[in-house]
Amino acid sequence: MTACWERFSMKILHDSRKAEYREPFGAAQTGTKVSLAIKIEDPSPESVRLMLWHGDDNDVHYKEMSEEGNGRYTVSF
């Protein structure tokens, strides 16, 4: 039996200098709600998660991103 692996590329856009991708702009104080967004062009993923960690800490957290349409995904934390 032969295994066949398809490779594909996915274009993911995020510009931290534009309000449409990040709120608030710039550094946020501890405890402030932050919203991030990305835009994904074809192919569309089944799901999108944001991976969060702090420094060398091995405690990794994942946040599911919500699809808003037209390839735009958002998350707030």
Image (spheres, grey):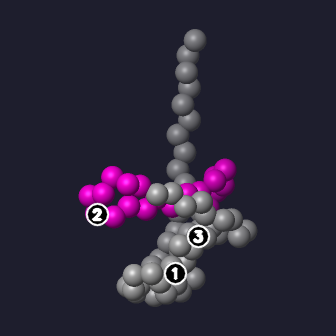
- Quick one: label 1 or label 3, which is nearer the N terminus? 1
Q: Which residues are magenta?
A: 41-60
- Quick one: label 1 or label 2, which is nearer the N terminus? 1
Q: Circle 3 is placed at which residue position?
A: 75
Amino acid type indicated by mark 3: Val
Query: Where's residue 52, x and y in %?
Result: 43, 62
Q: Nearer the viewer, residue 5 or 55?
A: 55
Q: CA distance from mark 1 to mark 3?
A: 10 Å
Q: CA distance from mark 3 to mark 2?
A: 21 Å
Q: Circle 2 is placed at which residue position?
A: 55
Query: Where's residue 74, x and y in %?
Result: 61, 70
The answer to whether residue 18 is visible is no
Q: Circle 1 is placed at which residue position?
A: 33
Taking the spot 55% from the left edge, 77% from the top edge, the residue there is: 35
The circle on residue 65 is: none
Q: Which image quadrant for residue 30?
A: bottom left
Residue 8, compared with residue 73, is above or below; it is above
Furthest toward the left, the residue is 56
Mark 3 secondary-structure assignment: strand
Q: Main secondary structure of the magenta part?
A: loop
